[in-house]
Amino acid sequence: MITYPNCKINLGLHVVGKRPDGYHDLETIFVPVHDLSDTLEIVESDNLQMAQEGIVLDNAPEDNLCTKAWRLLHEEFDIPTVSIRLQKGIPFGAGLGGGSSDAAFTLKMLNEMFALRLTDSQLEQRAARLGADCAFFIKNQPAYATGIGDKLEPIEWNMKSEKWKVIIEIPEGEHVSTKEAYGGLKRDLFGTVRPNLREVVKRPIEEWRSLIVNDFEASVFPAHPAIAALKEEMYRRNALYASMTGSGAAVFGIFPR
């Protein structure tokens, strides 16, 4: 079986506060983007195998989230061993959710291959154990997310509209770790009243520039001026809206077609 796990972008990202467990509560809108994806192939095998190709990852195959997704279901349902081949097209450390997407697609593929009959809700519960935004990629539809990114509420926003296109770019050589992005956050952001993202996205995209903010830009841009410069370059190229996605380093622009 072969699928094509896609990436996501964040429309706004508010860090609401720090939780007792060390994680942060967030508010964001996840939107799937299908133009940038990985290729994931899974077949039954005599033993568990994981092959990573394409963009070189910074983790060993046995630590890949696809392998962890198989182990999660194997422990619960005793599913057979498989051979997993992952061709990476989505850069890691970019805020695009590539690893989370791979994990969620692995769960969905294994669910189908071995007739586990898990519902989307049941798959989301298991995906959330693998990573904060993994659950989003189960239904893979625009969603308003809260909590650590695991509480999802469907919204209507059509990324496939004929009116605009999304362009994603990463400054050469730039990489932002999640630890770095969170470490630079200013605590005075916590509890700040923000525009309601669910309402703001209903407004014309041209108005978003002054309304929709990614809090991580304030902590990431000073240390990575090339990312800030790319965002401004997007506007010079007539983007209707531009923003860093997630904790970086990717920047997206929404352009008129």
Image (spheres, rainbow, N blue to C red):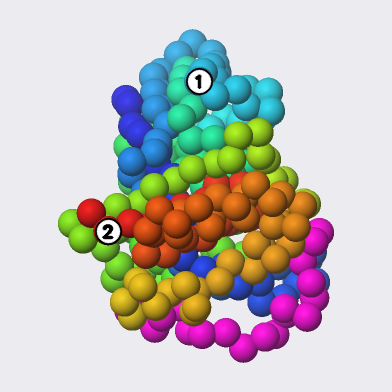
* Pointer 2 local density, CA inside 10 Å: few below 14, some 14–19, many at least 20: few
Q: Residue at x 69, y 51 (%)?
A: 225
User: Would residue 192 be found to the left or right of residue 111 on screen?
Assistant: right
* Pointer 1 local density, CA inside 10 Å: few below 14, some 14–19, many at least 20: few
On the image, the x and y values in percent for residue 150 come to: 54, 63
User: Is label 2 or label 1 in front?
Assistant: 2
93 w.r.t. 123: above or below: above
Q: Give the distance between the C-alpha atoms of the residues marked 2 and 1, in whole angstroms.
A: 31 Å
Residue 47 falls in image quadrant? top right
Q: Earlier in the sequence, mark 2 or mark 1?
A: 1
Furthest-left residue in this view? 162
Q: Residue at x 49, y 43 (%)?
A: 169
Name the foreground residue: 221 vs 136.
Answer: 221
14 w.r.t. 128: above or below: below
Residue linked to disc 1: 54
Q: Residue at x 72, y 46 (%)?
A: 177
On the image, the x and y values in percent for residue 199 come to: 39, 83
Residue linked to disc 2: 256
- Residue 171 appears in the picture as rendered: yes
The magenta span reads 182-202
